Image: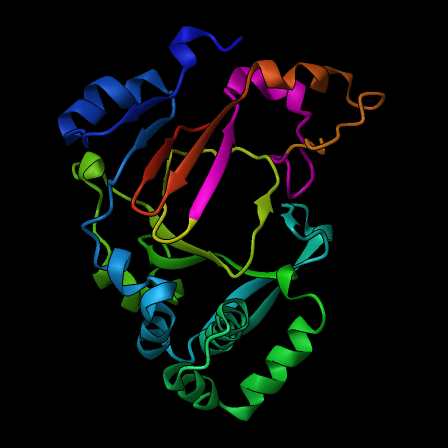
Amino acid sequence: MVEENLRIHTFTEIPSPEIFSSKIEPKNVPAVFKGCIKNWKAFSKWNPSDGGLIYLQEHVGSVIVEAMLSRSAPVFNGDIRSHERVPLSFSTFIRYCLCLLENRDGRQDDLLESQKHSLALSDTERTDLLFGEAPQQFYLAQVPILNFEKKEHMQLECLGKDIQTPVPLETKSLDSVNLWMNSMKARSSTHYDPHHNLLCIVSGCKEVTLWPPSATPYLYPQALYGEASNHSSVTLEKPDLSVYPRAACLNGFSQKVVLHAGDALFIPEGW
């Protein structure tokens, strides 16, 4: 059973910066803020079902970003052996998303058609080459909108005008703001980060399973000398208990939250 002092709290009213700093952050326990970012321009302007992909295409265009090409989709592992980073234009990714949206919804409207045909032939060829028969293996991960240490690496800086610091963090200094975007259902391997995060859902929904730092031994972190030492070695859907016997205890430590568009999740360091 999860200890009472580690239970995730959901706030239906957005806490002030003072409440966050004095009562939420010091507990070092995740917290859900419902509707926290519904006032962002991105919340409406980036909505794929309401022209958001075309808006993103028009504002970002042919900027080169790094995409992740996964060999373990729909699970995206941190292990470098499971993926590679592929440079391509943001236009290429948007074109592919538009094609998927059209195929999913049976849409044939002129706006989608004109948007796809406006892309360069080289982008079209590159998309076909990259995606082939496995489109679910491709996504954008941690593409910088803001990065105060490496300002020259902010490929999506132009989108910064569509977001703002969420109310609970208004008195905090942010190190970075990154975009994660995928075109199909996907799962990230279990991992922790060495800093606080605020996960903001602009569109779609996301289920997050959380374990406290005290559960780390049961998650079998990968070797310290590897590039994915903050990722779990365990396949959580069907753990091999002959190799990872402590994983049998994982369910007793886990908590699940489902985030919808507009919600934000505070994930403390080490969770």
Indicate the position of residue 85 as horizontal and vertical percent values.
61, 62
Residue 147, placed above or below residue 67: above
**From the viewer's perspective, is 141 left or right of 21?**
right
Residue 107 image position (x, y, % from top left): 46, 76
Residue 67: percent from the left, percent from the top? 55, 64
Q: Nearer the viewer, residue 166 or 40?
A: 40
> Seen from this angle, which residue lies furthest front?
106
Number of numbered tags placed on the structure image: 0
Q: Which residues are magenta?
A: 205-231
Q: How is the image coloured?
A: rainbow
Residue drawn at x 21%, y 46% as measured from the top left: 165
Residue 171: x percent and y percent? 16, 36
* Frontmost residue, 65 versus 202: 202
- Taking depth in this image into account, of 70 and 225 the one nearest to the observer is 70
From the viewer's side, name the closer residue of 139 and 134.
134
Furthest toward the right, the residue is 242
Q: Is residue 226 above or below residue 218?
A: below
Magenta includes 217? Answer: yes
Does residue 250 sit above or below 82 in this rendering?
above
Q: Is residue 103 above or below residue 220?
A: below
**In the image, is 160 to the left or to the right of 150?**
left
Q: Residue at x 70, y 20 (%)?
A: 247
Give me the residue at 40% from left, 28% from top: 268
In the image, what residue occupies the spot 71% across and 31% down? 234
Q: Was residue 268 drawn as part of the magenta stretch in this picture?
A: no
Q: Quadrant of residue 242?
A: top right
